[in-house]
Amino acid sequence: MAVIGLGLIGGSLAKACKSRGLVATVVGADARAGDLAQGLAAGVIDEAASIRDAVTGADLVVVAVPVKATRAVLEQVRPWLHADALLTDVGSTKVSFVQAVAAVFGQVGPKVIPGHPIAGSERSGIQAATGDLFDRHKVILTPQAHTDSDGLAKLTRLWEGCGATVLTMTAAYHDEVLAATSHLPHLIAFSLVDTLAGEDQNMDIFRYAAGGFRDFTRIAASDPVMWHDIFLSNRQAVLRVIDHFNADLQQLRTAIATEDGARLLKVFTRAKAAREHFSKMLSGQSYVTDMNQKQVTFHMQPGGRVSGDIRVPGDKSMSHRSIMLGALADGVTEVTGFLEGEDSLATIQAFRDMGVTIEGPDKGQVRIHGVGIDGLAAPRGPIYLGNSGTGMRLFAGLLAAQAFDSELTGDASLTSRPMNRVASPLRAMGAVIDTAEGGRPPLKISGGQKLTGIHYDMPVASAQVKSCLLLAGLYAEGMTSVTEPAPTRDHTERMLAGFGCHVHRDGATASVTGGSRLTATTIDVPADISSAAFFMVAATIAPDSELTLRHVGMNPTRVGIINILRLMGADIEVSNERDMGGEPVADLTVRSAQLKGIEIPEDQVPLAIDEFPVLFIAAACAEGETVLRGAEELRVKESDRIQVMADGLATLGVTTTVTPDGIVIPGGQTIGGGRVHSHSDHRIAMSFAVASLRATGHIEINDCANVATSFPDFVELAKRTGFQIREDVSGS
């Protein structure tokens, strides 16, 4: 590896690669002879050389000079660079590097891979170089469409070997993002220190400055020459973000001058939330938690009994809807029992991006300052919904009639899921929606469309599709009605009624009339029966078990899990039944029982659609055969839950027969040990954790990070109730 420029970044990369044995030989080149000598003496490099000698025969050439000096260095590199050598850089602007390469070489070849480590220090020079500078930091690579894939893989492994997490994006997008997340903060820090240094009370200002001021202005001690080059190289992107910042700063000044506390609270709460997700914005995502950047594995020891008295987290479906309807209501909505999982938090962030002030969540409490049915503002960019299919489908209906354009996107799992089931009927109402190939996200929704109410007969029972159309119906002219082929959860209808919007229900048909206003209310979100299901099955199949689950939502459209388990012979006692804001809740006590296989009634399938993965575990422990039919929707969830569960059971020694719309599971088989692939599906991961209670060997479940999407406290509650579970977290 040849490193041209032994400053902080170049020297640290050389030192990391040399100390960790990532390359055979590190050759350094630098116009400053003293830095070369110091690097050689300190063991940062193996050899010191001219650019000619360093580049000749090198497999990898790293340009680590100030960005304004890049072209001149490339001119010296070109005659000696081998055709098979990789060429990269570490500069803070990527378009300028690409342009310099094209100017010097005549093209940007497949072996050219621009790079930018998001790491640094206010110190500079070879004396500041450290081998751990990139640990737990991000490196952005900006490959071209024709970039050599093997070369990209090698460079990625090298940076990962230095302790970094590697992201990829286009060079132009990199410069736009970094203008906002790095260049503007540095510019503000330089300007603020310069301004305050010119104040009459400058000595006292700096003498009494608190830690926050020192932390922020620390970056004003960075290398002035380097930042001079960066700002001029990324001039257009920096100017755009400065103009945007100036406009927003002027709005805050006006709010303070006019004592507009509501605007200040809106900006501050939105900013506080955004700060928690700030590092993820570098990869073009407005909301992802740290756990999504990690590899999480569950290690399950076999056996155990389940006991205790617990309350599982709040219902995810109701948490989503409480935020949505609260945001559209007139007044302030108070929510308790809110599920603080990734999916629900993504919904909060989306509404903050559209101008809604939301306080919390704080221990399940959220306060939503509604903006009214017509009060949403255009988001500044795509609305990122993580792994939330519920969020995407409901937002599609809500945004179809807004005055502004919007785009809905999500993680790799969500962007592989079909969305035509909502896009097609919305188009029939007058919405203009573009999807990716196969009707998949992202969804690009054109604003300013006039919607007209329709009647829609759903071909497949789906509460998400029904809710999507009812939300769109709030904005449509006339009546919007939806008929479902089988009962689905009715949280949207119940909650709309709670907000003062009349929902007419006639058998299998629900309808709303456009033009209704919503009035803020108070919502107590019950414990999620889908989350309780894992513990219900656990207490049923584990010997000598008894477990009480408190405040569980008992909506008639959600109790399929209880009905099916009881048909199989489960011992489930329902007590303390009551009504909370239009939703029935109760306490459940579950005891060990010997289950028997059944043919699952098809009318119960929609009532337990999310709980079938763990029901498959119950079926494997039952006596006799369990048959499921009419559950084709399971194939288009976060994973193909029928096939993925069958594959995992096969790994553990349990044979099944998969059918197009279901599965046949012979009971009474021995559950062994093995390594199960969850396919990043939280319900798959938790279901096989339950299987360990009856297993004969250790079960390892991979890709469990998404458990946080619906059940952030699963591991803690599992340990408390008797599971022998260990969580292994790696990566960053």
Image (cartoon, helix red, strand yellow):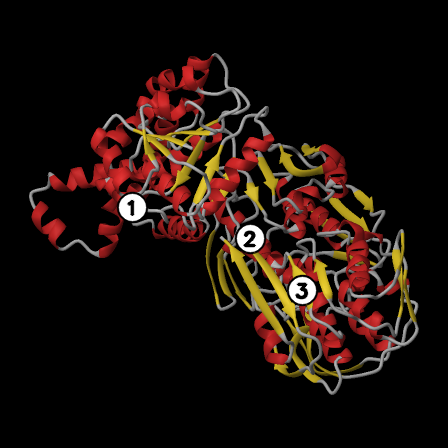
| Mark 1 or 3, closer to the camera | 3
Could you say which is closer to the camera, residue 339 or residue 119? 119
Report the amino acid beneath label 2. Answer: Asn
Tag of residue 700: 3
Could you say which is closer to the camera, residue 209 or residue 271? 209
Residue 353 in percent (x, y) is at: 49, 45
Gap in angstroms between the C-alphas marked 2 and 1: 42 Å
Report the amino acid beneath label 3. Answer: Glu
Q: Which residue is mark 1?
A: 258
The mark that comes first in sequence, 2 or 1, is 1
Query: The residue tagged with tag 3: helix, strand or loop?
Result: strand
Q: Residues within 10 Å of mark 2 (few under 14, many from 20)?
A: some
Question: Is residue 371 left or right of 610 when viewed as pictured?
Answer: left
> Quadrant of the rendered structure where residue 162 is?
top left
Please tell me whether residue 424 is drawn above or below residue 206 in the rendered image.
Answer: above
Contact check, label 3 and label 2, Cβ < 8 Å:
no
Q: Residues within 10 Å of mark 3 (few under 14, many from 20)?
A: many
Residue 390 in percent (x, y) is at: 67, 52
Question: Is residue 682 left or right of 611 when viewed as pictured?
Answer: left
Please tell me whether residue 498 is drawn above or below residue 587 in the rendered image.
Answer: above
Query: The residue tagged with tag 1: helix, strand or loop?
Result: loop
Report the amino acid beneath label 1. Answer: Thr
Query: The residue tagged with tag 2: helix, strand or loop?
Result: helix
Kindly tell me whether residue 494 is visible in this rendering: no
Q: Which residue is mark 2?
A: 292
| Mark 2 or 1, closer to the camera | 2
Could you say which is closer to the camera, residue 585 or residue 669? 669
Q: Residues within 10 Å of mark 1 (few under 14, many from 20)?
A: few
Judged from this view, the residue extending furthest toward the bottom is: 544
